[in-house]
Image (cartoon, coloured by chain):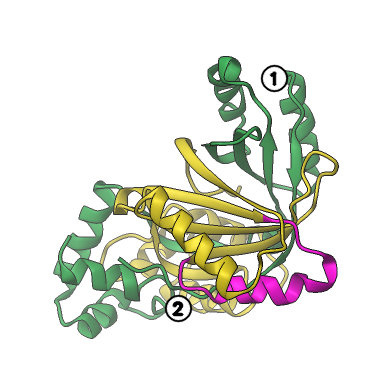
Chain colours: A green, B yellow
Amino acid sequence: MDDIDRSIINNLQGGFPICDHPYAVVAEQLGIDEADLHNRLQQMLEKKQLSRFGPMYHAERLGGGLSLCAMRVPEADFERVTEQVNAFPEVAHNYARDHEFSMWFVLGTETPERVEETCQEIEKATGYKVYNMPKKQEFFVGLKFEV
Amino acid sequence: MVLSEQDCQLIAAIQGGLPLVRHPYAEVGKQIGWSEDQVVTRIGEMQQSGIIKRFGVIVRHHELGYTANAMVVWNVPDQRLDVVGEALAEQACVTLCYQRVRRLPEWPYNLFSMIHGRSQGRVTAQVEQLVDELELGDLPHEILFSGQRFKQRGARYQ
């Protein structure tokens, strides 16, 4: 990763132009040509430094449900429960955390009601209580992730 | 903003990423039977209405060397919540900040802030500094570091 890659990440977390040839516009701002920008994005995607290049949707405004959930899973049972939880297509990502509340996952569902239903289905499948912690308010942090 | 069935097709067509070609919106249009202009106009409207929060690179912190991903949770009295939430969100190291539902009695925390750092030690030091500078010493809080990441993909729609 060189300075231009860093500049792409730092400057392109939002505000990608919506016009006929948007990559050309961005490439010019960065002082590189369009093919170079394509290559660099492609490489960062292949190296999995980027998960994608495109839109981030506001799930609730799309009519879907979104929530953060946690479970208290003992280490001995962690692998089994992880497999069961990840098998649900509604589970967007799942992190182990160093805490009694050891498993944390995000649910993204097609309807708001599906969040609670999915929690119940996960409880039934795993035998552990799911603590559903929906968002009440978001504080704006801006786009400031820098490399 | 009311979404039509065609809008849903557009949303599905670009959710995995925009094609890396000279006329990406024309390419997307081909897939769903729209002109380039129609795609450009509609994506612009979706941004304006907030359905699209942002449009650009979606990074994977871990692969970029930010391996210590900490969720710092706080128990904040309701009357102080807005002030504390806004103050935390302003800090350079805080990448997400949400108020969430408490799950009493087991889970008393209602403010969640995400900090990505290059090591656990540095994140812990940053949290100590925040507590000091923002005078949060009286608020119960915990740092939950991530262990293994088992699954990461964007939420999928349609």
Instruction: Name the quarter where the N terminus of chain B is drawn.
Output: bottom right
> Which residue matches tag 2?
B37
- Amino acid marked by disc 1: Thr
Tell me if B122 is positioned left or right of B20 in this view. Answer: right
- The residue that label 1 is drawn on is A126
Residue at 30% x, 54% y is B64
Residues A131 and B129: in front is B129
Residue at 61% x, 27% y: name it.
A85
Main SS, magenta residues: helix
Visible in this render: residue B112? yes
Which chain is home to disc 1?
Answer: A
Residue under the point 83% across and 67% down: B78
The nearer-to-camera label among 1 and 2 is: 1
Q: Secondary structure at mark 1?
A: helix
- Looking at the picture, which amino acid does disc 2 mark? Asp
| SS state under label 2 | helix
> Disc 2 sits on a residue from what chain?
B
Mark 1 is surrounded, within 10 Å at the Cα level, by few (under 14), some (14 to 19) or many (20 or more) other residues, namely some
